[in-house]
Image (spheres, rainbow, N blue to C red):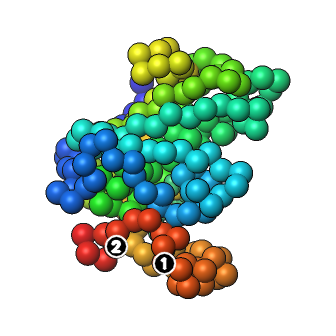
């Protein structure tokens, strides 16, 4: 079988939880108030409340509503991938790496009906230089329920300049006026 671009490379090391990472059980702050995945200020967002687990692992629950449909009464696959992307990206809170998604591979195993609760979990699988390898799953109805969606991802660590260079100026200016819009510590500057 051909190796996937999200397979752990031979030189990968175990991802380490930062000593200042929030304690297990802590609801992690949104990394950006207008983030579609976790931001409270984003009216149309998923509003995921993501909780730090043990090691480098986080969890969340996602209530699937009529606003998330792709087919009648069923969740849209791209939206489910967004929820997985978000919970994977939040692992950076625990490693203190500010990472962006470079690759996201998603398997859709079961349809997800409107009205269901997806129990999301992600974990870091390893680190190689700037690359963080991680995986996630969403289970229907409970933490032991059947797997409906699963993902493997590669995140790449970036500096603040990534956001400063590429972000829309008016949104960057809003952050400069109100730094509380960003909910992550300054770990890209002071790792
Ligand atoms: C002022 C405001 C502050 C705000 C503070 C907020 C902080 C907290 C933000 C958290 C946010 C999370 C939110 C949820 C997660 C998103 O949704 S993030 C948004 C979606 N993702 C993106 O927009 C990323 C777009 N892509 C890029 O910008 C660039 O391609 C990347 C990913 C930064 C990589 O570019 P690069 O830095 O030039 O690095 P590059 O040398 O190309 O690649 C580095 C390594 O990764 C490998 N690689 C890169 N892409 C791939 C790929 N697709 N497949 C396989 N390998 C790859 C390369 O082969 C290379 O490997 P090595 O040679 O080191 O072995």
* Quarter location, residue 41: bottom right
Give the percent coordinates (x, y) of residue 115.
Answer: 68, 24
Find out if the beta carbon at label 1 lies less than 8 Å from the nearest ligand 1 atom.
no
* Image position of 79 with respect to 117: above or below: below
Give the percent coordinates (x, y) of residue 2.
Answer: 43, 30
* Quarter location, residue 9: top left
Pick whichever, 131 or 184, lies toward us.
184
Give the percent coordinates (x, y) of residue 135.
Answer: 40, 36
- From the viewer's perspective, tell me whether residue 131 is left or right of residue 88: left
Please tell me which residue is depicted at 54% across the width and 27% down the height of the picture: 118
- From the viewer's perspective, tell me whether residue 179 is left or right of residue 18: right
Callout 1: helix, strand or loop?
Answer: helix
Q: Earlier in the sequence, mark 2 or mark 1?
A: 1
Callout 2: helix, strand or loop?
Answer: loop
| Residue beneath disc 1 | 179
| Residue beneath disc 2 | 186
Look at the image and tell me in which quarter the N terminus lies: top left
Q: Residues within 10 Å of mark 2 (few under 14, many from 20)?
A: few
Spatial separation of the CA atoms under disc 2 and disc 1 = 11 Å
């Amino acid at each position: 079988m051909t190796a996937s671009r999200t397979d752990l490379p031979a030189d990968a090391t175990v991802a380490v939880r930062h000593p200042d990472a929030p304690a297990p059980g802590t609801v992690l702050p949104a990394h950006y108030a207008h983030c579609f995945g976790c931001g409270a200020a984003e009216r149309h967002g998923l509003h995921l409340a993501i909780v730090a687990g043990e090691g480098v692992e986080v969890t969340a629950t996602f209530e699937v509503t009529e606003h998330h449909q792709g087919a009648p009464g069923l969740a849209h696959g791209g939206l489910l991938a967004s929820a997985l992307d978000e919970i994977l990206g939040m692992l950076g809170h625990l490693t203190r790496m500010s990472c962006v998604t470079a690759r996201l591979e998603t398997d859709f195993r079961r349809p997800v009906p409107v009205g269901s609760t997806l129990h999301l979990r992600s974990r870091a699988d390893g680190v190689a230089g700037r690359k963080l390898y991680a995986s996630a799953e969403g289970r229907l109805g409970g933490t032991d329920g059947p797997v409906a969606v699963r993902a493997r991802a590669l995140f790449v660590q970036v500096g603040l300049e990534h956001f400063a260079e590429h972000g829309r100026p008016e949104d960057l200016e809003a952050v400069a006026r109100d730094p509380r819009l960003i909910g992550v510590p300054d770990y890209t500057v002071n790792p």
